[in-house]
Amino acid sequence: MKLFVRAPRLSEAPPEGLRRMRIIATGLLVFMAATFIATRALDNGHPAFGFVQAFAEAAMVGGLADWFAVTALFRHPLGVPIPHTAIIPRNKDRIGDTLAIFLRDNFLTPVVISRRMRRMDVASIAGEWLANPGTSSKRLTRGCSRLAIEILQALDQERLGGMVRGAMVQQVRNLQLAPLLGQALGAAMADDRHLPILNGIVRAAGQILETNEHLVRAMVHERAGAVMRWTGLDETLSNKIIDGLKKLVRDMAEDPDHPLRGKAEEALATLAHDLQHAPEMAARVDALKLAMLENPAMQGWINGLWEQARTAMLRVAQNPEKLLAGKFGDALKQLGETLQRDSRLRATINRFVRRAVVGTAADYGDGIVRLVSETVRGWDAETITGRLENAVGKDLQYIRVNGTLVGGLVGLVIHTIDTWL
């Protein structure tokens, strides 16, 4: 996809330092011209007038030459379309391409980024900031907050949300769920952490039996013969069955060594083994997983996750101080202290960050380069001229001043040599 950005036409006011230096350079040139005119008009034959005149004349020439050179970079001097002037506006597309190539070759190659990232201890910086949020730069916190808000609000939410949802679903699809469930169940049984669940199942069975006694009575009544119904024995049989089931459930709840509980644990152990080692069970779990993912209710829940996460991130970014003052802030502070103490953890995080940045550069470096190049191409001549002149123009005005003074000194030296000879 072509990332073409058409920047608005901007008329940026020059910074105060540039305006002052431009006045100084122009004023010095005017002063040299006035001095030259005055020495020509007031020449009384004194030798000093010749030196002053030579200095002013050469300084005026040097100042005019450097004014022409500096102006020719950004525009046509005096509006006259002299060849090889207005260099930057005429070559802005080539400048954008060259800048993009320079950025790619010197900053966005995986080798360069990896080498630079090795000198950065991101984990230590993050640990110090997290451990001492009160003494950290509030300007940094506010800047990060504004940047996060602008990014979250500027991104295409529908497209980004679709990418997040797609990534989540793909991760779940690729997940081997059956072995994980088997390992979790086996570990729980090894530590007797399954007993509360088993007790809950027994209690739930007792409650289900109490609330559905009428179903048992109706079943016995329907299947009993006419003689049993006429004599009322079906009611007696129903009571016996219900009382027996209640006693069974009660005994299972009270006796940890009840045979049926043992059978249930054997079934759970078999299930844990089959989940980890039986291909048929893994296939059944995968089929159930895919059916859940394709369920409209599950898709709706997944679709809402991104918007909930985005809303939460915006809320946090809008008030980072509140976040750092709560329990989550305490956890972050503890994480920062851990990062400061644990060198192995810092090394792991730095390695992860380095690989993530290098991977991002490898995957999206060309896109970033195209963005820079086509953004510069999208600027009009006035915009790029104004931005570059404001960025480096102050130093260019120093060149005008130096050219005026150096030219004057050269003229003075030439006049001195000519006088002696």
Image (spheres, rainbow, N blue to C red):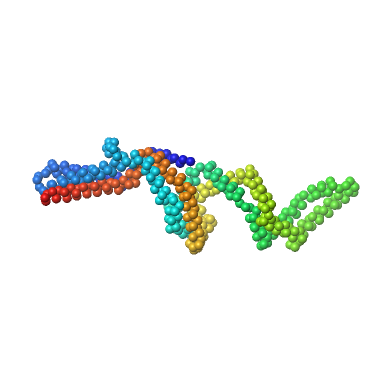
Answer with the quarter of the image where residue 72 lies.
top left
User: Along the horizontal axis of the image, is 281 left or right of 231?
Assistant: left
Q: Nearer the viewer, residue 239 or 187?
A: 187
Which is more toward the observer, 406 or 134?
406
Q: Is residue 115 above or below residue 94?
A: below
Residue 201 screen position, x and y as percent:
72, 55
Instruction: State whether residue 24 appears in this view.
Output: no
Q: Nearer the viewer, residue 420 or 224?
A: 420
Q: Count the numbered circles shown.
A: 0
Give x and y (percent) for residue 291. Answer: 65, 46
The reply, left or right, for residue 164 in relation to residue 373 is right
Q: How far across and down, in percent of the image, does residue 352 sit?
A: 50, 56
Q: Residue at x 17, y 50 (%)?
A: 413
Residue lying at 15% horizontally and 43% vertically, measured from the top left? 38
Relative placement, left or right, of 99 versus 408 is right
Q: Is residue 104 visible?
A: yes
Q: Nearer the viewer, residue 221 or 160?
A: 160
| Residue 57 falls in image quadrant | top left
User: Which residue: 51% across, 47% down?
Assistant: 314
Residue sitting at x 42%, y 48%: 104
Residue 87 at x, y percent in the picture: 32, 41
Residue furthest to the left in view is 45
